[in-house]
Image (spheres, coloured by chain):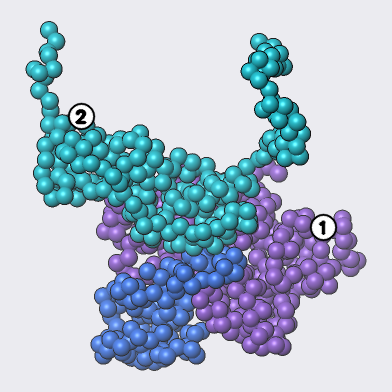
């Protein structure tokens, strides 16, 4: 968890991050649950879909009363997965119709966060 | 029009294709205020989204290279209209200025370029409009006030988060777009969803999530009476405009609402030729709502009835 | 007094190929050096003139961490060179029918979406033996400026050294080819006189003349040739 650079131990599970997260309804583990698993050293956190469907909106980090950069923690989980060759988006699976209409900005940011 | 000031302009990858009207209206509008947006002679993709991991220096190369390009052109200020580019460029710039070790490594990797000496400032066009041009001047130049048009400002995430680069001192309730809407003579419709994420890059693989976001955002705004949404980011525009169709599959009662860039509305209010605004390219046509409010064309073509 | 060829001492340099140290004359190219050592090259050799892109080579100089690229037929050996060749590059080549494509920005993304992964690291430009600004043309293709991508990539000889080093796994040279083909087919201005003439030929305007000429004997052809219409000298 050094990638995140935060003192994760200070999270006291207030749940403000999960409350503000726009995608929390479809995540298997909520952001505050992810934080808890990391605190416990539970590696099954890497199996959750949380950080893949995180859209880096940064609301969690903006609202955390302890000043933890939760978005950075999500990014570090993404990086750990991407660096062990796990990808969320497969370029070969993108349909022709999608590629004809998606603006570059969508592809660039998606590939940045979700492919390795 | 005598142009008094030149400022380096970073268009962004999408500005030459999908968002070309954001690009053209930005330039035209700024010319009205005597500012010449000079596109960098050589620029590369900003590498959005900003790399949050501490040890991923590769992701900082792209934005810093553009800082070097700005200096090569002899400018110290760089302005962009795309919010995601603004976020990436400004944060990378800030990282470079605060972390000496990373700065050194980045300069060393880019040995074929001149060293970057941290002397460039990154601005968003809205900041230039608010701080350099001043909202008052805009009101004075408006010839086609958007009277009665209910505009919902939509900021998205990258313009207001994180706090250190937010263009407004209050990231939870920014006012810059509202002020702009007032200046153009329209009625702002503020909404709690105006700083909620549109779904961003999830639109590539998880379109249904973006459709859900679009449904919530548009649903809330239309319930408050909004007729048109004003955005500043091409990805927000794509998500709110193009994915409306999928949002309607989730919620068939979702009304249709056009989504335009703030510079397009500014250009319309400043009396620019309607054909140059690019409204035909949108998935939901703004012309319908604008016709209803009798706002199309310059006053010569469509006279605005002024109460005496 | 000039020395005889026997007296001039040939300067030799040490090179390393396949983990073995060799001594070769210093004035040879890498390709000639390999042949000097007895290898018969079947792959990784072509025009021998720096134009076909077959002899892509990567090398290091002993003791130096830097990785250099070169064309074996064009680069001279240096002392301490540790050489490896990449005769075939596993490239991502998409199949397309140029007649069914449109020269719009998203065409480049449709076939090579990986260009959106470009992080502007410039490693491709540094690897190019033809001094092409590879990163710039990939970026031009990304933003949809097909004409610029075609112009910048004009000198590309498809050696594949850029693609070998790219961290985003882009096959730059194939992107360049698509850009140039789209440019030539759809964007470049057309010669009206050429299309007019092609049309005339296809409609058979010259068929009679040609068939007569095919039947004529040498004398008749000579007569035709000498009395042909030509511009004043």
- Determine the secondary structure under disc 1: loop
Identify which residue is drawn at 66% across, 58% down.
B21
Which residue is at 26% across, 58% downward?
B101
Which chain is cyan in the picture? C
Q: Which mark is residue C27?
A: 2
Residue bearing mark 1: B298
* Quadrant containing the C terminus of chain C in the rendered view: top right
* Labels 2 and 1 in the same subunit: no
Left or right position of B304 against A4: right
Q: Residue furthest top?
A: C1
The chain holding disc 1 is: B
- The blue-coloured chain is labelled A
Residue C167 in picture, x, y percent from top left: 35, 59
- Mark 2 near mark 1, Cβ–Cβ under 8 Å? no
Chain B colour? purple
Chain under disc 2: C
Q: Residues within 10 Å of mark 2 (few under 14, many from 20)?
A: some
- Crowd class of label 1 (few under 14; some 14 to 19; many from 20; radius 10 Å): some
Q: Mark 2 falls on what kind of element? A: loop
Residue A84 vertical placement versus C229 (above, below): below
Q: Is residue B229 above or below residue C186?
A: below
Q: Nearer the viewer, residue C11 or B114?
A: C11
Give the x, y percent position of residue C113.
49, 63
């Amino acid at each position: 968890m050094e990638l995140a650079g935060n003192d994760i131990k200070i999270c006291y599970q207030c749940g403000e991050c999960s409350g503000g997260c726009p995608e929390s309804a479809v995540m298997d583990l909520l952001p505050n649950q992810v934080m808890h698993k990391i605190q416990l050293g539970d590696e099954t956190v890497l199996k959750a879909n949380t950080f893949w469907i995180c859209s880096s909106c940064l609301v969690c980090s903006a609202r955390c009363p302890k000043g933890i950069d939760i978005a950075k923690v999500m990014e570090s989980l993404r990086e750990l997965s991407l660096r062990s060759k796990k990808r969320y988006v497969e370029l070969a699976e993108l349909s022709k119709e999608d590629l004809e209409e998606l603006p570059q900005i969508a592809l660039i940011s998606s590939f940045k966060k979700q492919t390795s | 029009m005598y142009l008094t000031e030149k400022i380096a302009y970073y268009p962004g990858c999408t500005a030459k294709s999908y968002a070309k009207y954001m690009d053209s209206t930005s330039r035209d509008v700024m010319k009205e205020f005597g500012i010449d947006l000079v596109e960098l002679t050589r620029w590369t993709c900003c590498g959005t989204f900003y790399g949050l991991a501490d040890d991923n220096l590769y992701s900082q190369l792209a934005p810093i290279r553009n800082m070097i390009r700005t200096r090569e052109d002899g400018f110290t200020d760089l302005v962009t209209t795309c919010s995601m580019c603004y976020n990436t460029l400004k944060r990378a710039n800030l990282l470079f200025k605060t972390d000496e070790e990373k700065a050194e490594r980045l300069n060393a990797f880019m040995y074929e370029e001149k060293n970057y000496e941290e002397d460039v400032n990154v601005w968003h066009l809205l900041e230039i409009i608010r701080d350099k041009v001043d909202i008052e001047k805009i009101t004075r130049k408006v010839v086609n006030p958007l009277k009665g048009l209910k505009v919902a400002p939509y900021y998205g995430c990258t313009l207001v988060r994180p706090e250190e680069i937010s263009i407004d001192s209050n990231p939870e309730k920014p006012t810059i777009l509202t002020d702009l809407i007032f200046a153009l003579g329209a009625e702002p419709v503020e909404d709690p969803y105006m700083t909620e994420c549109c779904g961003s890059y999830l639109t590539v693989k998880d379109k249904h999530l973006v459709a859900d976001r679009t449904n919530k955002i548009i649903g809330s705004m239309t319930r408050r009476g909004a007729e048109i949404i004003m955005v500043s980011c091409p990805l927000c525009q794509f998500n709110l405009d193009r994915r409306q169709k999928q949002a309607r599959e989730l919620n068939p009662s979702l009304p249709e609402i056009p989504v335009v860039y703030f510079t397009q509305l500014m250009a319309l209010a400043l009396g620019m030729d309607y054909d140059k605004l690019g409204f035909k390219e949108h998935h939901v046509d703004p012309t319908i709502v604008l016709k209803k409010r009798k706002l199309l064309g310059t006053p010569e073509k469509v006279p605005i009835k002024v109460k005496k | 007094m000039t020395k005889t060829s026997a007296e001039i001492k040939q300067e030799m340099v040490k090179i390393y190929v396949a983990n073995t140290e060799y001594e070769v004359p210093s004035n040879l190219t890498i390709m000639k050096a390999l042949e000097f050592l007895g290898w018969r090259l079947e792959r990784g050799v072509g025009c021998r003139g720096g134009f076909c892109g077959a002899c892509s080579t990567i090398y290091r100089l002993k003791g130096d961490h830097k990785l250099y690229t070169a064309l074996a037929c064009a680069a001279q050996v240096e002392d301490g060179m540790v050489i490896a060749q990449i005769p075939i590059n596993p490239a991502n080549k998409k199949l397309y029918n140029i007649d069914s494509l449109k020269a719009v920005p998203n065409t480049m993304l449709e076939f090579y979406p990986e260009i959106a992964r470009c992080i502007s690291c410039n490693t491709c430009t540094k690897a190019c033996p033809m001094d092409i600004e590879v990163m710039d043309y990939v970026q031009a293709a990304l933003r949809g400026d097909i004409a610029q991508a075609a112009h910048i990539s004009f000198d590309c000889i498809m050696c594949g050294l850029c693609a070998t080093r790219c961290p985003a796994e882009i096959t730059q040279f194939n992107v360049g080819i698509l850009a140039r083909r789209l440019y030539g087919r759809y964007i470049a201005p057309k010669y009206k006189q050429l299309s007019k003439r092609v049309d005339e030929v296809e409609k058979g305007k010259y068929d009679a003349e040609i068939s007569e000429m095919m039947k004529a004997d040498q004398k008749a052809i000579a007569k035709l040739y000498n009395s042909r219409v030509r511009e004043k000298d």
